[in-house]
């Protein structure tokens, strides 16, 4: 399956899944075709040639996204597939964690993001803002030389109204929301230096049977920083503990699985349970990972929160559960679910035609203990101390749990939309499972 497409600037363009099809790309771009070589009727390129690697990046941006960039010879040349996969993942994070509980791209949502370390290419703001014209991004960098190239690339693509570039200092805050004079951000992203030192960088190649997949032209500040990628992202984590909900999603790319494991451990140490992870692999050459965390309680869709090839130890809590209902129709299951939830003191929005509904609850009102308390508090019970909940008071002021329920043939699917308590989500799943199947 070719990795290129003629649908440029597509707001929902899919992830790159496999290696770039050089035959398809060469047919679409003569500049790339001129640098390809042939062997046994198959095109290939020399990934150790800086000119060829740069042309591959320029051609993919041109063909797949309608973008053009200028790159210096002594700064990083970004591989497009992994970079786009990172942007696409952030799009899905935002699409599945909105106040409207939507699962799709909302063209009316005004999104503001930050790229920490834009580099000379400025590739992340270019990809993000060209694919979603209503998005705006700020980009920071500590290197004046790279920043000048980034500015040229923004202007060359007529994105100056959407992308704002800011010079930073190595000892300044990495997330400068106050300096930017913004109250909050929808997301931040960063592709930090992976290595702690020159020795660390050299050791990364020890034991490998082949040289690196592509020549590296990165400057020292792009490749090395104190603590490497873990140290850099830890700085962002520490700042996020102060900023908290002022950024909906803090995200970062990481160079090694071990780095991802260390950052996930730090999130758990700080009591952050709403996080997501992904493997950004595109083809067989480059594998990277990314992590995102949020202090808000909107939960991403399960395939977004646990995206790609990952080890079990880094996975966040699941945000979906399925209940098998053998031999039962969607209509039967829907009537059963509607009957159960309509009797509870929750906000229940049921759409019978599509057999879907959304439930919001302040707290657990379905357990035995909750039912006993309700009975004790009822004014109809002699000696009780409560009063009936009025119809217009059923909408919860504070949502402790929001769940979307899909009733299908032989299965009911529950999607955790909002809340900090996974046990509460599991408890509701248990209630419906007992009602649908008669089993715990």
Image: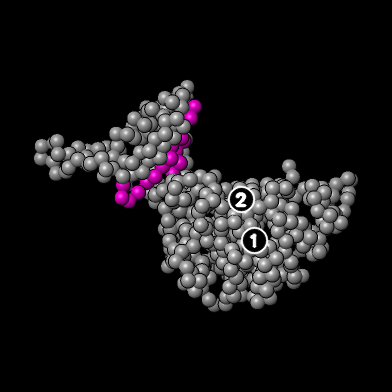
Task: Specify the quadrant of the image occupied by residue 347.
Answer: top left
Residue most toward the top?
327
In reply to whether residue 400 is colored magenta, the answer given is: yes
Magenta residues (range):
396-416
> Which residue is tagged 2?
11
> Residue 31 vs residue 353: left or right?
right
Is 315 covered by the magenta stretch? no
Report crowding for label 1: few under 14, some 14 to 19, many 20 or more residues within 10 A (C-alpha). many
Of residues 43 and 266, the one nearer the viewer is: 43
Identity of the residue drawn at 75% across and 50% down? 20
- Please tell me the numbered disc located at residue 242: none
Measured Cα–Cα span from mark 1 to mark 2: 13 Å
Residue at (40% x, 40% y) in the render: 358
Q: Residue 179: image x %, image y %?
A: 49, 74
Labels 1 and 2 touching (C-beta < 8 A): no
Q: Quadrant of residue 426?
A: top left
Question: Residue 68's spot in the image, x, y percent?
Answer: 72, 61
Q: Is residue 300 left or right of residue 34?
A: left
Q: Which residue is at 88% across, 50% downward? A: 38
Residue 255 coordinates in the image, percent (x, y) = 63, 60
Left or right relative to 359: residue 135: right
- Secondary structure of residue under mark 2: loop
Q: Residue at x 39, y 45 (%)?
A: 402
Quadrant containing the N terminus in the rendered view? top right
Q: Nearer the viewer, residue 213 or 36?
A: 36
Element type at mark 1: helix
Which numbered disc flags the more N-terminal residue, 1 or 2? 2
Residue 27 visible, this orientation: yes
Q: Which residue is mark 1?
A: 126
Q: Where 163 sits versus 91, above or below?
A: below
Q: Is residue 413 above or below residue 77?
A: above
């Amino acid at each position: 399956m070719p990795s290129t497409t003629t649908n440029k600037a597509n707001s929902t363009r899919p992830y790159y899944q496999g290696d770039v099809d050089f035959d398809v790309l060469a047919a679409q771009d003569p500049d790339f075709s001129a640098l390809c070589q042939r062997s046994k009727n198959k095109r290939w390129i020399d990934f150790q040639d800086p000119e060829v690697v740069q042309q591959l990046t320029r051609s993919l941006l041109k063909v797949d996204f309608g973008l053009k960039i200028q790159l210096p010879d002594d700064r990083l040349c970004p591989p497009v597939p992994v970079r786009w996969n990172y942007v696409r993942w952030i799009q899905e994070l935002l699409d599945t964690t909105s106040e409207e509980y939507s699962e799709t791209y909302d063209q009316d949502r005004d999104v503001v993001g930050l790229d920490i370390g834009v580099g000379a290419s400025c590739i992340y703001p270019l990809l993000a803002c060209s694919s979603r014209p209503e998005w705006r991004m700020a980009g920071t960098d500590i290197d004046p030389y790279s920043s000048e190239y980034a500015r040229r690339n923004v202007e060359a693509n007529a994105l100056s109204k959407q992308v704002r570039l800011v010079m930073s200092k190595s000892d300044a805050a990495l997330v400068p929301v106050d300096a930017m004079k913004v109250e909050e951000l929808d997301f931040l992203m960063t592709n930090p230096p992976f290595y702690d030192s020159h020795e660390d960088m050299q050791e990364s190649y020890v034991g490998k049977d082949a040289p690196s997949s592509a020549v590296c032209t990165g400057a020292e500040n792009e490749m090395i920083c104190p603590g490497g990628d873990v140290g850099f992202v830890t700085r962002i984590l520490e700042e996020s503990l102060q900023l908290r909900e002022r950024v909906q999603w803090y995200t970062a790319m990481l160079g090694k699985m071990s780095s991802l494991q260390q950052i996930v451990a730090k999130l758990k140490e700080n009591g952050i349970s709403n996080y997501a992870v992904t493997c950004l692999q595109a083809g067989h050459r480059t594998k990277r990972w990314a992590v995102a965390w949020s202090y808000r309680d909107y939960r991403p869709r399960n395939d977004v929160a646990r995206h790609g090839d990952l080890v079990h130890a880094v996975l966040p809590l699941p945000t979906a559960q399925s209940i098998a209902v053998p031999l039962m129709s969607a209509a039967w299951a829907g009537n059963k679910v509607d009957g159960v939830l309509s009797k509870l003191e929750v906000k229940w929005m049921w759409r019978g035609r599509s057999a879907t509904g959304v439930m919001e609850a302040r707290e657990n009102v379905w357990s035995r203990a909750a039912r006993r308390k309700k009975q004790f508090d009822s004014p109809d019970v002699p000696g009780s101390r409560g009063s009936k909940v009025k119809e217009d008071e059923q909408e919860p002021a504070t949502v402790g749990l929001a769940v979307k329920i899909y009733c299908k043939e032989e299965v009911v699917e529950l999607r955790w939309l909002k809340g900090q308590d996974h046990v509460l989500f599991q408890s509701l799943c248990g209630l419906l499972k007992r009602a649908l199947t008669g089993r715990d």
